[in-house]
Amino acid sequence: MDNLTELTPLAPMDGPIDVILDAGSTYKTENVCAKMIRFSVEEGKVSNLDFVGGCDGNLKAISRLLEGMEVGEVIAKLKGITCGKKDTSCTDQLCNALSEYAK
């Protein structure tokens, strides 16, 4: 897939551009409400997870819950989850992004 892009630096979507978190990745989603996922992986753990678009409250909660979780554990728990009549979901798209990152 060509959806994953390495970013340097990573600024928060809702904050000022001059606030830099760290280097990270962005993933353009497919067939879900969120349009993009931005994240970092530090020592094999998910950090700075940010969904652009989608169900704001739910995705903020998911981002907090996944902070510091091992990449493999996130993929094992969330891969294959669907949303409504779609064959994917925002969390399934996150798993695609993390799998691509881990290659």
Image (cartoon, rainbow, N blue to C red):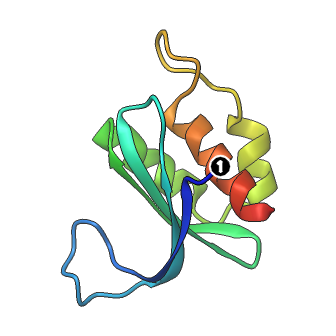
Of all residues, the one furthest to the left in this rendering is 16
Most extreme residue toward the front is: 2
Pick the front one: 93 or 30: 30
Label 1 sits on residue: 1
The image quadrant of residue 77 is top right
Q: Amino acid at mark 1?
A: Met
Pinpoint residue 57: horizontal percent, then vertical percent: 31, 41
Query: Up-down: is 49 above or below 24?
Result: above
In the rendered structure, the answer to whether residue 45 lies left or right of residue 88 reads right
Q: Which of the pair 42/97 is nearer the observer?
A: 97
Residue drawn at 75 percent across, 79 percent down: 43
Along the horizontal axis of the image, is 78 left or right of 72?
Answer: left
The image shows residue 84, relative to residue 7, as above or below, that is above
Give the residue at x 23% y 90%.
Answer: 18
Can you say whether 52 is above or below 15 in the image? above
In the shown orientation, is residue 16 left or right of residue 40?
Answer: left
The location of residue 46, given as percent across then percent down, is 63, 65
Does dot 1 land on a helix, a strand or a loop?
loop
Badge 1: few (under 14), some or many (20 or more) residues near its Cα, within 10 Å? few
| Residue appearing at x 34%, y 78% in the figure | 11
Q: Residue 44 occupies which quadrant of the picture?
A: bottom right
Q: Percent x, y for residue 13?
A: 28, 66
